[in-house]
Image: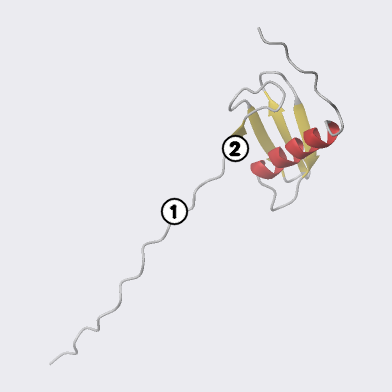
Amino acid sequence: MGKRKSTRAKSAPKKKVEKLETHFCCPFCNHAGSVECTIDLKNCFAEAACFVCKESYSTKAHALTEPIDVYGEWIDECEKANEGVEHAPRDSY
């Protein structure tokens, strides 16, 4: 006679990890998906560049740097540069 098979509780299915975006909307020309982030960990360098209006931003990178981090820093720097600047009201056409 053999042993009875033990009953195991089935494990829960693993959740899929959603990937973060690598293409973003340009803060200058507002084209969707026109900003691409590249990270060079060998030289500790990261760059976000728009291929429509040719604007770019570069910063230092480390092992945990993701494209969303580079884009977020670019947006923060744009907000700092525009701090205290008043926008002229637009005329209706």
Tell me the residue at 35%/70% (across/down).
11
| Furthest residue toward top | 93
Q: Label 1 crowding class (10 Å Cα cut-off): few <14, some 14-19, many 20+? A: few
Badge 1 or badge 2: first in the primary sequence: 1
Residue placed at 78% from the left, 45% from the top? 44
Q: Nearer the viewer, residue 38 or 91?
A: 91
Tell me if mark 2 has few (under 14), some (14-19) or many (20+) residues whose alpha carbon lies within 10 angstroms of its own: some
Q: Where in the figure is residue 54, as x and y percent of width and height?
A: 73, 20
Residue 4 against residue 13 in the figure, above or below: below
In the rendered view, tell whether residue 1 sits above or below residue 54.
Answer: below
In the rendered image, residue 59, in percent from the top left (x then y), is placed at 79, 40
Residue at the bottom extreme of this rendering = 1
Residue ID for mark 1:
16
Q: Secondary structure at mark 1?
A: loop
Image coordinates for residue 62, horizontal then vertical, percent:
75, 50
Count of numbered circles on the image: 2
- Identify which residue is drawn at 67% across, 10% down: 92
Residue type indicated by callout 2: Thr
Residue at x 72% of width, y 46% of height:
41
Quadrant in the picture for residue 22: top right
For the residue pair 74 and 47, the one nearer the viewer reads as 74
The quadrant where residue 37 appears: top right
Which kind of residue does numbered mark 1 sit on? Lys
Label ID, residue 22 = 2
Q: Tell whether 6 sits left or right of 22.
A: left
Rendering quarter of residue 30 = top right
Name the outermost residue toward the left.
1
The quarter of the picture where the C terminus appears is: top right
Q: Quadrant of the N terminus?
A: bottom left
